Image: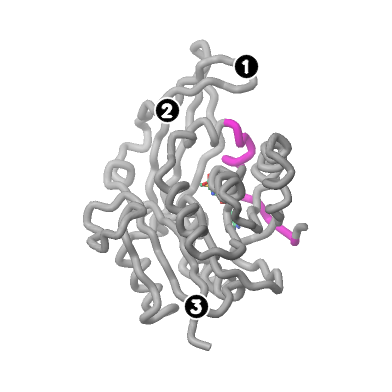
């Protein structure tokens, strides 16, 4: 299933294997989303499902998932990975190519997820509000919207845009070669957009990856926006735990309840 989509700005995701290699070590978020989905008990709508880093563990845990993403390449990779899963896992998923700002499925879910900082792809307040409206549109009475948002890091915002920082190397699954990886950061404070460059190096040859432009949602701005959009029915916690003091948080977890009937 698919709607008319515009995936400009998502070139970074054209190589899902590289994305996966960079983030394969993340697990606290996956465990958290699986726990929440099991506690909720019903079918889940996941926005920004990508190549299924969270989707697959949800499915394997027995959760039915409608997995939405804008990137055809990421969804193709998810389908490829699903081929290796048993039939009873595969039959629990529905894949939809669609936009979290505008999708209308005409169905409601007890839990609507945005997994791993997908809101950073929403570059303006209007876009974030459009996502919240889309999420609410699909929310069953008494249901919950749950998404995480990376807290801006002063190291990245203040970095010299010319400087490259080494990241963990990874093994290219296609060639078996070790790939050294470097990142650079350029911040536009007026638009609160952080452009992340990725440079890959194999056998001394460097290659520039597609840039990733991420909106920096500061906790106070996010809170102000939620106060307007969902007064009295949202909660923000830190790093997939119960902590409501956000001072040292790396990831915020935002929980929004359904509006009153
Ligand atoms: C950081 S990745 C997260 C992928 C996956 N949830 C994970 O945890 O690995 C963000 C995903 O959001 C998707 N995305 C970005 N903008 C989107 C939009 N407007 N609607 C739907 N998906 C979007 C990207 O294609 C990408 O797959």
Label 3 vs 2, first from the N-terminus:
2
Q: Residue 177: x percent and y percent? A: 55, 14
Identify the element where label 2 is drawn: strand
Label 1 to label 3: alpha-carbon separation: 48 Å
Q: Is mark 3 within 8 Å of ligand 1?
A: no
> For the point 37% across and 37% down, which residue is it?
161
Residue 10 visible in image: no
Residue on which the image places disc 1: 175
Q: Is mark 2 within 8 Å of ligand 1?
A: no
Q: Residue 191: x percent and y percent? A: 42, 59
Label 1 vs 3, first from the N-terminus:
1
Q: Nearer the viewer, residue 239 or 19?
A: 239
Residue on which the image places disc 2: 182
> In which quadrant will I find the N terminus?
bottom right
> For the point 51% across and 16% down, which residue is it?
178
Residue 154, relative to residue 241: is it above or below?
above
Please tell me in which quadrant of the rendered image residue 11 appears.
Answer: top right
Residue 180, relative to residue 113: is it above or below?
above
Instruction: Verify whether residue 4 appears in magenta.
Output: yes
Identify the element where label 3 is drawn: loop
Residue on which the image places disc 3: 258
* Position of residue 173 in the picture relative to residue 97 (left or right): left
Identify the element where label 1 is drawn: loop
- Which contiguous range is marked in magenta? 3-17
Q: Residues within 10 Å of mark 3 (few under 14, many from 20)?
A: many
Q: Residue 122: x percent and y percent? A: 51, 59
Q: Nearer the viewer, mark 3 or mark 2?
A: 3
């Amino acid at each position: 299933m698919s709607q008319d989509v515009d995936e400009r700005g998502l070139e970074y995701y054209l190589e899902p294997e590289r994305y996966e290699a960079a983030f394969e070590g993340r697990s606290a978020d996956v465990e958290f989303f699986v726990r929440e989905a099991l506690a909720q008990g019903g079918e889940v709508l996941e926005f920004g499902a990508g190549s299924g880093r969270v989707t697959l563990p949800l499915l394997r845990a027995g959760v039915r998932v409608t997995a939405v993403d804008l990137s055809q390449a990421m969804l193709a990779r998810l389908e490829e990975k699903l081929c290796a899963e048993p039939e009873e896992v595969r039959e629990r998923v529905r894949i939809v190519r669609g936009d979290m700002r505008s999708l209308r499925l005409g169905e409601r879910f007890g839990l609507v997820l945005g997994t791993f900082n997908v809101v950073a792809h929403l570059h303006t307040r209007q876009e974030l509000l459009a996502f919240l409206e889309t999420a609410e549109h699909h929310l069953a009475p008494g249901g919950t919207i749950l998404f995480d948002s990376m807290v801006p890091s002063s190291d990245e915002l203040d970095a010299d845009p010319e400087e490259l920082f080494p990241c963990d190397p990874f093994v290219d699954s296609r060639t078996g070669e070790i790939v050294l990886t470097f990142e650079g950061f350029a911040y536009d404070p007026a638009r609160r957009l952080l452009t992340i460059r990725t440079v890959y190096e194999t056998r001394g040859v460097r290659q520039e990856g597609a840039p990733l432009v991420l909106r920096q949602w500061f906790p106070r701005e996010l809170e102000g926006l939620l106060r307007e959009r969902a007064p009295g029915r949202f909660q923000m916690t830190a790093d997939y735990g119960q902590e409501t003091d956000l001072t040292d948080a790396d990831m915020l977890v935002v929980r929004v309840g359904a509006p009153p009937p």
